[in-house]
Amino acid sequence: MKKPSVELKLPILPNMELIATQTAEVIARHMELTEDQGAEISMALIEACINAFEHSKSDNNVFIHFLIEEDSLIVKVIDQGIGFDKTKVEIPKIENKVGKEERKRGWGLQLIQELMDSVEFESNNEGTTVTMKKNIKH
């Protein structure tokens, strides 16, 4: 039997990540995930979508693929942007953020990695694919 999958094609417009999270919530219910697992997937997905929207410098769509497996959910966020070098992404120092005017942003990649069970980044000058996996604990 073919594993079910859902594919979204989102234009880069404000709040489009909400369509991705609504889809993730439906899939999480279908898979009988816990509320916490569903929330973790949605938060990681929001971060990955916002990164694609804000940093890819792409005029094209962002594609999201949900692959439903027996013991896991794999979510791929794919953009056709400029790519990035993960080794050059600095994690912000919290002391520079708290109580300061500096933007309270920049934790997206780390947050995604903490929310999901595994995360892979593939990136080149033709785009970026973020592959996130959440293992299902029944």
Image (cartoon, rainbow, N blue to C red):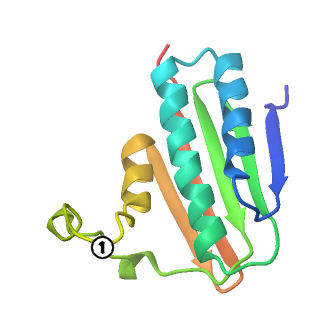
Q: Position of residue 17 (x, y in %)?
A: 68, 50
State left or right for residue 13 relative to residue 109: right
State left or right for residue 83 relative to residue 126: left
Compare residues 111 and 85 and report the one nearer the observer.
Answer: 111
Q: Position of residue 21 (x, y in %)?
A: 66, 39
Which residue is located at x 55 percent, y 27 percent? 38
Does 122 appear above or below 21? below
Q: Is residue 92 visible?
A: yes
Which residue is located at x 39 percent, y 67 percent? 106
Which residue is located at x 43 percent, y 59 percent? 108
Image quadrant holding the N terminus, namely: top right
Q: Secondary structure at mark 1?
A: loop
Compare residues 110 and 5 and report the one nearer the observer.
Answer: 110
Q: Residues within 10 Å of mark 1 (few under 14, many from 20)?
A: few
Q: Position of residue 58 (x, y in %)?
A: 73, 78
Q: Looking at this view, name the residue that lies furthest to the left.
A: 95
Q: Is residue 132 visible?
A: no
Which residue is located at x 28 percent, y 72 percent? 101
Q: Which residue is mark 1?
A: 102
Residue 129 falls in image quadrant: bottom right
Q: What amino acid type is highlighted by mark number 1?
A: Glu
Does 18 appear above or below 84? above
